[in-house]
Amino acid sequence: MRSIKVQVILWGAQRLSALVLALCVLVHLATIIYAVRSGLTAAHIVSRLHQSSLWTVFYSLFVLAIAIHAPIGLRTVVAEWGYQGRIIDGLLGTIALALVVGGFRALFALQGLA
Amino acid sequence: MSELTVRIWRGLEAENGEFQDYKVPRLESQTVLDVVTYVQRRVDASLSYRFACRVGVCGSCAMSVNGVSRWTCRTHVSKVAKDGLLEIAPLRNLPVIKDLVTDMSVFFDKWAKARGQFQGEHTRHEAFAQVKPDSKARKNVDAAIECIGCGVCYSSCEVVSWNADYLGPAALSRAWTLVNDVRDVAQKERLQAVAGDAGCQACHTHITCTERCPKGISPTAGIAGLKRAVLNASLKGEL
Ligand code: FES
C-alpha cells in the first residue's frame, strides 16, 4: 500500500498521460491512413522517419506516455483482482522499463540514431 | 384476483441461504414493500426485513428487486414485476444478517472514515455564518444534501464489489457536501481521508450509483468534484 500522496500522483500521471496518448494516437492513426494511400513499403517508412527530429520528438513523447499509462492502469486492474504490494509494484516498474527500452530501441533504429 | 409469484431470499449469514417462493395477491398500487409485508404478516412470520417510514424518508427499506437495488416502499410492483414474478434479495455488497436484513455498519463506518462529520469552529455565542444561497459551493451542497443513507448506491457500485476498502458513493458524496461547506474547518483532513486508491481516485465513473439513486442525487458528480479538489490540493502540496 503506497502513501496517499503517491496514489494521487499515480492517478494524476495516468490522467495526464491519457491526454497525451489521445493526441498521439490520433496523429499516429492519421499518419498511417495517409501513408498507406500509395502502398506501404519499409523504404517509405524509413525515408519518412529517418533523422526527422519532429518525428523523434513525437514518438519519444508517445513512448513515454505509454510507459507511464499502461503500468498504472495495470496496477488498478491487478488491485481489483486482489493483488497488491511490493512485488506487484516491482513487476509493474519492470513493465514500465521494458516499454521504455523497447519503445526507444525501435524508435532509435528507425531514426538511424543507433 | 390475480397472483404474484414472489421469490424471497431466506437464510442466515453463516448458512447458505436460498430463494423461497411465495404467492401474494396482486393489488392495485401495490409496492414491493407491501408484498414483503404481506408475506411476513400472512404467510411466514419468521421473515426478517427492515422498514420504518414507508414514504421514502428513512432509507431503511432498500433491497435488491429483480437484481436491481431499490427503495422498496416507493417502488410499485407494476414498475418492476417481470411476467408477474418478483425476486427479492438483500442488498449486495453488505453482509447478510438474516433474510432481507443486511449489516450496514461497514456502510456507515465508511461515512465516518470519509470525514462525513461537520466540523465548525463557531459557538452559539457567535453570529450565524452567512452563506449565499446562489453561490457555487452552496449549490453543490444542495445537489447532494438530500441523501437518506439507504445504501442503494453502495450496493449497486461495481468498484465496491471489487475493492472492499473503497469508501463508496454515499460516503464520498457526503464528504463532497462538506468540502463545499464554507463553515467547515477540517478540509485538509477530509481531502486526505477521501484521496487515493480507497477513495475518490478509485471511482471508474460507471455512473451506476447515479442511475440507481432514488433521490436523484449524482454521487458521480460529487466524486468528480472530489477528484479535482484532491488533485488541486496535491499540486499545492497540501495533501
Ligand atoms: S421505509 Fe423509509 S424509505 Fe422506505
Image (tube, rainbow, N blue to C red):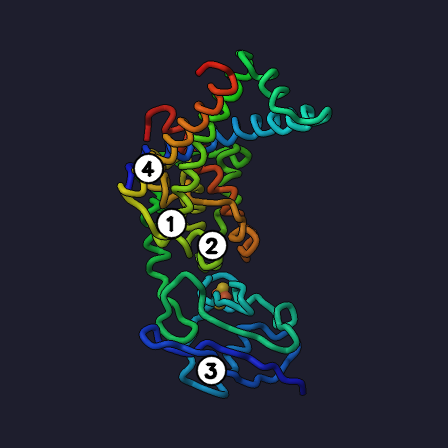
Q: In this view, does A20 lie to the left or right of B15?
A: right
In primary-sequence order, the first of circles 1 and 4 is 1
- Closer to viewer: mark 3 or mark 4: 4
Badge 3: residue crowd in 10 Å (few <14, some 14–19, many ≥20): some
**Chain of the residue under the numbered disc 2 shown in the image:** B
- Disc 2 with disc 1 on a shared chain: yes
Disc 1 residue type?
Tyr
- Closer to viewer: mark 3 or mark 2: 2
Which residue is label 2 attached to?
Answer: B157
Please give the name of the residue rendered at 49% of the width and 22% of the height, measured from the top-left corner: A107
Disc 3 residue type?
Gln
Q: Do the residues labelled 2 and 1 touch (CB within 8 Å)?
A: yes
Distance between the alpha carbons at the discs numbered 2 and 4: 22 Å
In primary-sequence order, the first of circles 3 and 4 is 3
Which residue is label 4 attached to?
Answer: B192
Distance between the alpha carbons at the discs numbered 3 and 1: 35 Å
Q: Do the residues labelled 1 and 4 touch (CB within 8 Å)?
A: no
- Depth check, front residue: B20 or B130: B20
**Chain of the residue under the numbered disc 3 shown in the image:** B
Which residue is label 1 attached to?
Answer: B166
Q: Is mark 4 on a helix, strand or loop?
A: helix
Distance between the alpha carbons at the discs numbered 1 and 4: 14 Å
In primary-sequence order, the first of circles 3 and 2 is 3
- Depth check, front residue: B158 or A81: A81
- Closer to viewer: mark 1 or mark 4: 1
Q: Is residue A2 left or right of residue B166?
A: left
Q: What element carries label 3?
A: helix
Q: How many labels does the image show?
A: 4
Q: Do the residues labelled 3 and 2 touch (CB within 8 Å)?
A: no
Q: Tag on residue B71?
A: none
Which residue is label 3 attached to?
Answer: B40
Please give the name of the residue rendered at 58% of the width and 67% of the height, measured from the top-left corner: B75
